Amino acid sequence: PWDRVGADVRTRLTWYVEAAGDEKDVLNRASQLGAYVLVERATFAAAHDRRGLDVLVADDPILQSTYVSILLDPKNESARLWQEWLKSPAGTAGIAQFRINGIEVFRPLESSAERASG
């Protein structure tokens, strides 16, 4: 990822620190260090203590994560109903309205027809 912006972090050890653990651990470490960190919106929203942390970059297409649900067994009625609900107006509205601690964390993709014409 750093190659895309032309930075060789190996030569920048005064400002770059690798952190181990899951995103929650890394977010906590950034808070303690007063550092910048790249985490998904859901991780940020779910953090119990966000003191000293602010969102500096959001909605950049290069940072977008896409989640998909794949129907592996069309004979499984529950799985098929889940897929249908996800694509329905009620499902996309549910996704759009979902919040963690008041913060929007997911956005439904536009319909396949809209993607094809866009």
Image (cartoon, rainbow, N blue to C red):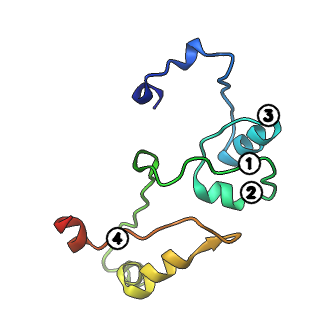
Q: Are there few (<14), some (14-19), or many (20+) residues within 10 Å of tag 3?
A: few
Badge nearest the viewer, 4 or 2: 2
Q: Which mark is residue 71?
A: 4
Nearest to N terminus: mark 4 or mark 2:
2
Amino acid at dot 2: Ala
Q: Using the image as rendered, state which of residue 91 and residue 30 is in the foreground.
A: 30
Q: Position of residue 68 (x, y in %)?
A: 40, 63
In what element is the residue under mark 1? Answer: loop
Q: Which mark is residue 47?
A: 2
Question: Relative to 118, does residue 15 appear above or below in the rendering?
Answer: above
Measure the C-alpha gap from mark 2 to mark 3.
16 Å
Badge nearest the viewer, 2 or 3: 3
Amino acid at dot 3: Leu
Badge nearest the viewer, 2 or 1: 1
Measure the C-alpha gap from mark 4 to mark 2.
32 Å
Amino acid at dot 4: Leu
Q: Position of residue 91 (x, y in %)?
A: 44, 82
The residue at 57%/12% (across/down) is 11
